[in-house]
Image (spheres, rainbow, N blue to C red):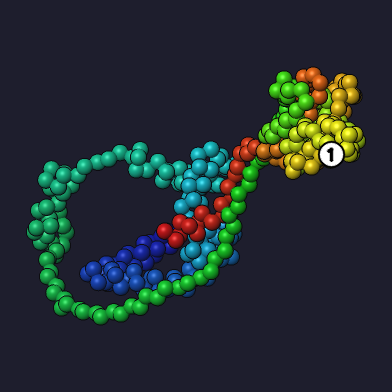
Amino acid sequence: MRVFYFATLAVLAAIAARAENSINTQADAFNAGKAFANDAKDAAVGKVNGDTGSQQLPYYGTSAPEAAHFQGGRNLIGANGTNKQNACQSYRASDAFQQQECDAVNFLSKTPATRPKYTIDKKTDPLLTGSKSVIDNPGPVPGAHTQRCRVEKVIHPATFITETCTESQTLENVKCRRGFSANVGTIVETPYFEVDHGVNVPPWTAQTYTMNFHVNGNPERLILTWYRVDNYGQLWINGTKVFENVLSGYGDMRWGSVGQELIGRGLRRQRRIVYKDRHGVSMGHFYDDGCNWGCLGVSPNLDITPHFKEGNNEIVLVCANANDIGPCTVKIVGSAKRLVMLGSLIDNQCATLEQRAQ
């Protein structure tokens, strides 16, 4: 054992002596390192590859999930980065390895807002002032074991390179969708119409009243609930006759009048009261029948919805009076539906393309 010990020391001493004798300059040290790297590079290539990476590093892969954000350089990634920053503010991974990604994102989000700011003054900073003498005179550096530092000035001639580039505009057709969604509600209106012109119709006269009835919304149901005209009358809506109490044989009484005509021949000729239409043509004998059913008043409860439209409607009421002044009234009630805008939503899928076009 003692012999072997001395032999080992002798070998190590020989190796150390040979190494000290073979490396005397910086070039010798560089070449020795280069030779070592050449010998080890082939082994390193065989050990560092995709297979060994997946075995040694968790979640190792050749492609990252974020590669989908690139889209050939045509996508704006600012929104993706903002979404990642917002997600990492509250994200907590199950282990420290997975948490590293959000730790890095959170660090960059807070930098440089929270990092300390330092001002380095080249005139007073000890690192700069202490190295100034070394930079100005690198030869006699105190403490150097070789004292071989020197300043070399290398002059390289100017090199000129002429480069040519061509830019061209590429046009492409890209489609996107932009829509408008409306939230519509319904309001139920209750239109109401009632008039009484009886006091305005003197005895043995006829009056035609043209009025407007505005329906705010789509007519849903309109009912004639009351009708009372003394002695005779007609109700027209938008040019259509919907109700009347008249003498037999009477036609359109609108804008007519009560007048007289001669009947018979010779000594038997006599005057009688008649009703004439707007053109002065007699419709027949006009007289006071006491008070007919229309004069007494009636509740027809007649559905007259088909005769109405949304908006303005023309109502014409004809009142023909005989002996005494009497009523001339109608009443219409019902309901109408009106659409109202409760809100809207714009679905704009073209925002990214609009930003690119700016």
Indicate the quadrant where residue 315 lies.
top right
Position above or below: 128 against 320 = below
Position above or below: 162 against 187 = below
The residue that label 1 is drawn on is 283
Is residue 222 visible in the rendered image? The answer is no
Dividing the image into 4 quarters, which one contains the N terminus? bottom left
Comparing 45 with 124, the one in front is 124
Residue 322 in the image: state x and y as whole percent. 81, 24
Residue sitting at x 73%, y 24% = 201
Give neighbour class at mark 1: few <14, some 14-19, many 20+ (Cα, 10 Å). Answer: some
Position above or below: 236 against 323 = below
Dividing the image into 4 quarters, which one contains the C terminus? bottom left
Residue sitting at x 65%, y 41% = 183
Residue 281 in the image: state x and y as whole percent. 79, 42
Residue sitting at x 36%, y 64% = 12
Label 1, secondary structure: give it: strand
